[in-house]
Amino acid sequence: MAMAGFYRRILPSPPAIDFASAEGKQLFMEAIQNGTMEGFYRLISYFQTQSEPAYCGLASLSMVLNALAIDPGRKWKGSWRWFDESMLDCCEPLEQVKAKGISFGKLVCLAHCAGVKVQAYRTNQSTLDDFRVHIMRCSTSDDCHLISSYHRGTFKQTGTGHFSPIGGYHAGKDMALILDVARFKYPPHWVPLTLLWEAMDRTDETTSQRRGFMLISRPHTEPGLLYTLSCKHESWVGVAKYLMDDVPLLLKSEDVKDINKVLRVVFLSLPSNFGDFIKWVAEVRRQEDGGQSLSQEEKGRLSVKEEVLKQVQETGLFKRVVAFLSSSNSCCRNAPILGQEDDLPDIAASVCCQGAQILAGKSSSVEGYCCKEKCVKCLKTNGEKPITLVSGTVVDGISEQGLDVLVPSSQTKMNCCGCGPSSHIGMYPAGNDVLTALLLALPPETWSGIKDEKLLQEIYTLVSTEYLPVMLQEEVLHLRRQLYLLKRCQENRVDEDLDAPLS
């Protein structure tokens, strides 16, 4: 019996011009001479074919991330850290992307989560002339790349919505080079810029919003070193709404008179899944990769984490949070991030399971993984200060993997609730410093509803980022950007420049 199948498509020309055709080559040479192909070389070095029919957005983004030399901070396969479509799973489940593709807004969210600076514009928020300026900017440098979201029908191509990076620009002919990631279907091709704009100026039927383009470049600051917000769990929508919408209203409606009452209002109604929302960033490695020693790179990263943790614990706000959590009328037991789950070996077991999942290249739930033989060690080498290492063996029913979690140490000893002396070996970020970092990251307008003027000024002094040490300031601003992003993603307003509210 015959089996139906397709081998590529004939590129409709005009309006497109095949990159490898004589005319396409001529356009390429002229654009090189005019200096508008500078971004091409980085992109072509990492040009890839989408691995699934609906993965055009993921393939475009991973290609750009690799072209910008963004370190994913986790291993892809073997010992290599590298962006692959399978690693872009935090804002939308891969199975859902595989079935339905990904929206413009969710791809912007993914780019932010990957640690890059993103400026996103739908066509109703920009103009053709502005688009041309952005195209020129990305084509004359290799530190910024543009991904276009467009409708194939405008070019007489089969299919509907599609994402691809723009590889260059011919100013004389006003044509853009599309590096089509569906290389099994169409080759790279030149199209008139005005027609590309028209293709972007189409409504996405799934979101009822216009398509557009995004500029992606390296971030001004590095991603969070010690804390991060997670949008991988469905809980993030409710938690983001609580922090950004409900807390300001609660503070406005309550007649709070002192700091403890302010903290009680904030912490008392924390959603039950709050612990899935803010995480401290743990460093995981295979035991066979490191043995009983740490590389200079690992020591350096751990030292930076410890410095950020120290800076958090030296803030006035941290001291007030610790005092509140240790008070008899605190809501410590009600705050889900502060319970028994803060036991270091239990946290490490969870992190080891997550690490095994990542190292295996899987994106599904960590269910089925079990961490056994947990132990906490202190490494002492060459007279250096001890390093806390939590080791575990993760089994998944088929194989087992030995993993280590490198734990930053703390000057302050606390118990699992963050309120007193600890009985655990080594210290780590716990409930009180996590909550302190999150309070610092809340937008200043959160507190504006407090009626007592003296208390309001005291709060502003405690949460001000102006005089924080540089490393902690960057950490807090990173969390604040994530909060704004999640809020805007929730409201389908991810197109705005995230630096705007932070300046």
Image: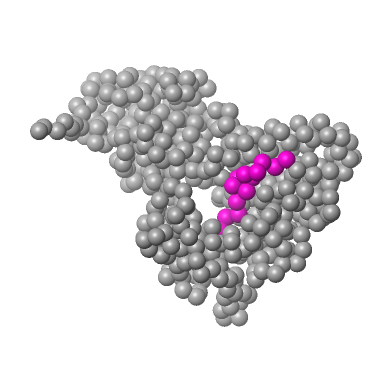
Residue 318 among those drawn in magenta? no
Is residue 58 depicted above or below 377 in this figure?
above
- Image location of residue 38, percent across then percent down: 37, 40
Q: What's the colour scheme?
A: one colour
Q: Residue at x 47, y 67 (%)?
A: 393
Q: If the image is split into quadrants, where does the N terminus sit?
A: top left
Is residue 263 depicted above or below 151 in this figure?
below
- Image location of residue 59, percent across then percent down: 36, 40
Q: Residue at x 78, y 53 (%)?
A: 325
Q: Residue 267 vs residue 80: left or right?
A: right
Q: If the image is split into quadrants, where does the C terminus sit?
A: top right
Is residue 343 depicted above or below 274 in this figure?
below
Q: Residue at x 75, y 43 (%)?
A: 268
**In the rendered picture of this protein, how many numbered marks are placed on residues?**
0
Residue 28 occupies which quadrant of the picture? top left
Residue 342 visible in the shown view: yes
Is residue 325 depicted above or below 455 in this figure?
below
- Image location of residue 389, percent across then percent down: 56, 69
Task: Say which of 53 and 362 sits in front.
Answer: 362
Task: Say which of 262 and 224 sits in front.
Answer: 262
Highlighted range, magenta: 269-286
Q: Residue 154 vs residue 430: left or right?
A: left
Task: Residue at the far left: name it.
Answer: 1
Q: Residue 240 vs residue 172: left or right?
A: right
Residue 282 among those drawn in magenta? yes
Q: Residue at x 19, y 31 (%)?
A: 6
Task: Say which of 117 and 87 sits in front.
Answer: 87
Residue 141 visible in the shown view: no
- Image location of residue 168, percent across then percent down: 35, 34
